[in-house]
Image (spheres, rainbow, N blue to C red):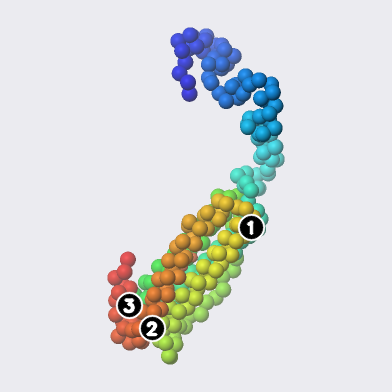
Amino acid sequence: MALLTPSATKLVTSGLSSKLAAPIRPSAPSRALHLPRATQEASSVTGLVFDPANAVKNELTTVDKTPPSQSLGRAAFDPECEAAINEQINVEYNVSYVYHALHCFFDRDNVGLPGFAKFFKDASDEERDHAHLLMSYQNKRGGRVQLKSIVMPEMEFNHAEKGEALFSMELALSLEKLNFQKLRELHEVADKCGDAPMADFIEGDLLADQVDSVKSAAEMVSQLRRVGKGLGVFLMDKQLQEAQ
Ligand SMILES: [Fe+2]
Ligand SMILES: [Fe+2]
């Protein structure tokens, strides 16, 4: 804000501030008023003179008519984007549920692989965090979160030929690749609707991490293929117990 000169301060304190002190503040609209008429007309045509009071009129009417049951902040958010985010929340919860089942399996006393149990618990929490991230973004954009049913997962992960660790990690890799595909589809919806902030959110907060998750699951599958079903799995479990 501009500093008041001693004479202007006098006007303010004498109760004439609203009428007389105003001209001492330089502002864009007041400068626009001094443009020659021809320039003003040309500017209106090219849109160079922005008149916020006029431009906001329509939005003000919309805000005024918004009932308390609806979002006030919703702006340029397509219902298709809203529905696609709800779908992805469900995908993340389903994947989280399968990882939780894997955690319980490896935590059993007759399986006894606490490192794998921890790995899958962390993976389950991570997917749940992704669901939470999407829920919070949905609310931020003025959409409405719709939670859907979660499918009951398998609880047995034995595999005579591969062993339970490799079998489970191949399942994890497939889930991560499926999730990657789902995120790309979500990004396509944002793109189709011309929703730049949503596309940016998916790229920055979800897609980049998903690429890392696919890579690390693929590496684990490769390592488990090398080590076999016995001592190798036991040593990998030790490694996973110590991992952060
Ligand atoms: Fe995820
Ligand atoms: Fe993941």
Question: Does the closest atom of ligand 2 sit within 8 Å of the Cβ of label 3?
Answer: no
The residue tagged 3 is 237
Does the numbered disc 1 mark a residue whose Cβ is under 8 Å from ligand 1?
A: no
Left or right relative to 64: residue 187: left
Residue 90's spot in the image, x, y percent? 56, 66
Name the kind of residue labelled 2 in the image: Arg
Question: In the rendered image of this protein, does residue 45 appear above or below residue 93?
Answer: above
State the residue at coordinates (46%, 75%). 173
Is residue 171 depicted above or below 210 in this figure? Answer: below
How far apart in space, not on screen, are marks 2 and 1 (Cα)? 41 Å
Expressed as whole percent of the image width and height from the top left, the position of residue 58 reads 70, 37
Separation of residues labelled 3 and 2 (CA atoms) = 14 Å
- Please tell me which residue lies in front, 165 or 68: 165
Q: Which mark is residue 192?
A: 1
Labels 3 & 1 near each other (Cβ < 8 A) = no
Tell me, yes or no, if residue 73 can be seen here.
yes
Q: Is 98 in front, or is 181?
A: 181
**Quadrant of the image for the C terminus?**
bottom left
Q: Secondary structure at mark 3?
A: helix
User: Comparing marks 3 and 1, which lies closer to the viewer?
Assistant: 1
Q: Label 1 crowding class (10 Å Cα cut-off): few <14, some 14-19, many 20+?
A: few
The x, y position of residue 147, in whole percent, is: 59, 62
Asked if residue 210 is positioned above or below residue 107 in the image, the reply reads above
Q: Amino acid at mark 3?
A: Asp
Q: Disc 3 or 1, which lies upstream in sequence? A: 1
Query: What's the residue type where badge 1 is placed?
Result: Lys
Along the line of sight, the residue nearer the viewer: 58 or 30: 30
Q: Which residue is mark 2?
A: 225
N-term-proximal mark, 3 vs 2: 2
